[in-house]
Image: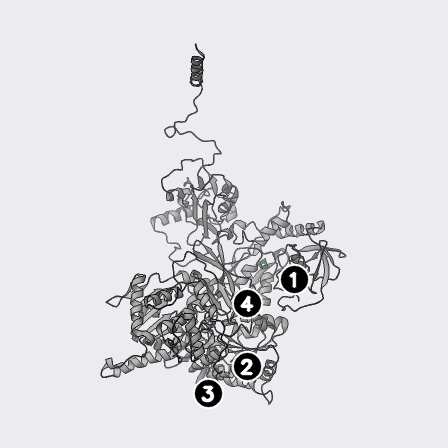
Amino acid sequence: MSEDQRRFFRGFGVPFSQMFKRVTTEQYPEDKRPTQPRYHGRHQLNRYADGLEKCIGCELCAWACPADAIYVEGADNTEVERFSPGERYGRVYQINYLRCVFCGLCIEACPTRALTMTNEYELADDTRAALIYEKHDLLGPMLTGMAAPPHAMVPGTTDTDYYLGNITHAVATQVGEAEARRLGTWTGPRDDEEVTA
Amino acid sequence: MTITTPGVSPVTVTSGITLSVDGVDITVPKGTLVIRAAEQLGVEIPRFCDHPLLAPVAACRMCLVEIEGQPKPQPACAVTVAEGMKVRTQVTSELAEQAQQGVMEFLLINHPLDCPVCDKGGECPLQNQALSHGRAESRFTGVKRTFPKPINVSAQILLDRERCVSCARCTRFADEIAGDPFIDLLERGAKQQVGTSSDQPFDSYFSGNTVQICPVGALTSAKYRFRSRPFDLISTPTVCEHCASGCGLRTDVRRSTVLRRLAWDEPAVNEEWNCDKGRFAFGYAAEGRLTHPMVRDESGELVVASWPEAMSIAAAGLRRAGSRTAVLTGGRLTLEDAYSYSKFARSVLGTDDVDFRSRPSSAEEIEFLAALVAGKPVGPTYAELESAPVVVLAGLDAEDESPMVFLRLRKGARLTGVKVFTVAPFASAGVAKVNGRVLTAVPGAEAAVLDSLADEVSGARDENRLEAARLLREPGAVLLVGERLAQSPGALSAAARVAKATGAALGWVPRRAGERGALDAGAIAGLLPGGRPITSDAARREAAAVWGVDPASLPGSPGRDLGAVVAAVNADTKAIAAAAKPSDVVRSVQALLIGGVEANDLADPAAFVAALDAVPFLVSLEQRHSEVTARADVVLPVAAVAEKAGTFLDWEGRPREFAQVFREALTLSDSRVLAMLAAELDASFGRGDIASVRGELASFGSWHGDRAQAPGHAPPEAPSVGSDEVVLATWRQLLDRGLLQEGDPFLGATARAGVARISAARATLLAVATGEAVTISTATGSITLPALVTTMPDDVVWLPANSDGSNPRVTLGAGHGDIVRISGGVV
Ligand code: SF4
Ligand code: FES
């Protein structure tokens, strides 16, 4: 064998030896693998166990964000419509995934653990608007025992009880209110009446 | 000079006191507080209760420093400097640093972790100083105090008591500055809290300032609560459009919406304060705005049109009317816009029928303004009010009509002993708060009272008048006249006589922000810009040179004011109706060009509306729908203050320039619209942009030629008042049903309730007590309000001019000085 031929076969030796090693290629999207548990994926706005939102609209996440990807507007919970325990809730909540760098500083900043990150990484789309996630895109799912806000707090509790985790599920009055509002049969205060907190 | 005693005017001091702060020597005037001396060296001692405009209390103890020779750390905000004093602050003294950290730890013991939901977060002195001067770890493990939260100390001011650090800034402000001590520190120890008395909410015209100076988030406003964070806001320094005080403000905008306005630091004008109207009433500019030009179609309906179409229709109508057009502008225009109307009227239309006074006014007032106010240099000033031996107010309720004048007078009365007299029927709340004394004048008799001050000081007269007359002759004395004097015949002449006889400085305090500017811009019959009389050839030549027109083309004799224009239109209408051949009657007013006039502001709203209906052609430049736009042939939308740059001249005559808040605004200023109209009329006018208008105004310079003589009208005979009749006294309260306060429910809820003030004797006569209904009526209508028995002349009743249930102009067809009937109960 000439020197040239030897070089030729030695070159093929690399791919040949690889054929017997474990393959690391993933067959995405046919085959989806779980990420590491702490992977920084899409955000989620969490709920308390009775369905009320944890977000208080404080904007600390927006403040912490180095990419200016988050936009929040706070508002007052009222007798008419309550979305979170306490006085204040996040009326507008947007995350712009064209800007987000998934650093997680917003999660660190959140004082109520309202904002956490999921492992979801499938964040691609073909318009800008579609990549600005609104509050309803980000809110966590309604789990068993929850009632969809707006509805009142568990009677006799304070926002501190919520914060300390003393609320375990929506009580009957809350479920009733949520259901009545859904069906349009709600007879309590409505926003066409002038009632404020 | 003393920086420390709040409010005392700077006086030059030759000798100083030398002390050392952190080893650096500094010489400061006697009486300076240690905290200020340190500031001058760039050493910032942490503080909460200290405020340069409030008296020291040393309530918070945050500013502790070490002073050599003192056994314990001392509060730098309450200790005045002494010769040779050696001060060591936290910068060089461990003791001071430890003391400050200890105080901070105590303050935080009961301070809730509310920062995420607190409006102050991000601009909070407590947050900032806890980081810079506190310990990283708290040793407190107990339970913090809590209170039900928040409570309303007034409809618009909310209080979260657990956040309070008991610095007493708010209570000191209310007590010292505003004179409305409706909030105070209650309870003691850990329970200490700010509170109101149960029957008196914190309804002060100045309550918003407490939100701004609270060093924590304990006081917040209902309007701004939860709306934003400081980093969301784009701030622009602006000037308030609500009155002629000229307050410097900061306007904060988030996403093209004004979210709040703050008082800005303007030592020569508003110091660091403003009134609640200026702070909270800005919603009007966001609601119900005109967005497109409109013209009348064949069926007479107003329909949206394009700018070019609207412009050509407006131009055609104005070309037809030519110099038979009258130009009426409201009192809220900027100097630049008022100037453009003034120029448009004279150089484009060739008319002198111009008037900016969309309120009851008189010809005597024009004479007065032309002789003594228009184009005059700045003064008297706020500083002069503060150091004057006496300030006499005539036809002016400072608290209601120019709140910063009121605050200055109060400061002067409190700290430098300024004596205040007011020519009025009674002592209003604002007069009491400046220790003012009343020179009692039944409406209409102001001239007589003023004239008695001009006389030689002698004779057996009322003691207050004697003292006022004497003090007015001292150097620095000030006489302030309000726009209401125009409704009292002879009063402005008398004011001019008093000023001349006594040598007192004369100030004219209109209510609206644009009036002084409009006057100086010549938006009034008979005056060209800068107070130039239109009858003067030299003045016309100067104006023509700036405007690039032939002096002969400018009108040479004074035109008609608003009242005369309206009367002329209505007289022509009558003549046409009576004429056998209506086409023979040529109207003397063929078109009206109106910018920002509200019918209900005028002396005779009905006559004005009739004139609007009758005039052949009506062009309206407006921000919102009004009675004028409803009747206009062409409506052209214009920019609100936040959408344009401009200048207001405050009552002193001081130019208060401001920048455009919304740089992306699509609206055009009045000046730009008039420039476009002029172009459509083939007139040379310029572009009407802010820079060129300001340039033109500057090139006018001041007028040194002749001026009109001050008016010398004699006061009229006192009218005879029947036994069931009284003379009406009335003015607009600061917070009322004004159009620019629309859309601000929290502010509206703090307005003073409407009352009818009557004397005790009148109340006995009518058999009513305070709180019971009295009815005031004329042939036109009647107003029923609860009575408030007041020390005042028996033949006078006072009603608010534009409050809930009380608009005498509209309901009674009567104004200040008119005779009305009065009876007890509801009629
Ligand atoms: S409410 Fe604010 S300003 Fe008033 S005493 Fe408390 S901390 Fe000071
Ligand atoms: S700032 Fe000196 S005691 Fe409060």
Chain identity of mark 2: B
Could you say which is closer to the camera, residue B603 or residue B27? B27
**Secondary structure under the numbered disc 4 in the rendered image:** loop
Question: What amino acid is found at the position of numbered circle 4 in the picture?
Answer: Val
Whether labels 3 and 2 share one chain: yes
Is the C-beta separation of discs 1 and 3 under 8 Å? no
Question: What amino acid is found at the position of numbered circle 3 in the picture?
Answer: Pro
Disc 4 and disc 3: Cα gap in Å? 37 Å
Whether labels 1 and 3 share one chain: yes
Q: Residues within 10 Å of mark 1 (few under 14, many from 20)?
A: some
Q: Which numbered disc, 3 or 2, marks the residue that appears first in the sequence? A: 2
Q: Which mark is residue B224?
A: none
Q: Residues within 10 Å of mark 3 (few under 14, many from 20)?
A: some
Disc 1 and disc 3: Cα gap in Å? 54 Å
Q: Which residue is mark 4?
A: B269
Q: How many marks?
A: 4
Q: Which residue is mark 3?
A: B716
Q: Nearer the viewer, mark 3 or mark 2?
A: 2
Residue B787 shows up from this direction: no
* B697 versus B104 height, above or below: below
Q: Nearer the viewer, mark 4 or mark 3?
A: 4
Q: Nearer the viewer, mark 1 or mark 4?
A: 4
Ligand 2 within 8 Å of disc 1? The answer is yes
In which quadrant of the rendered view does residue B538 lie? bottom left
Q: Which residue is mark 2?
A: B499
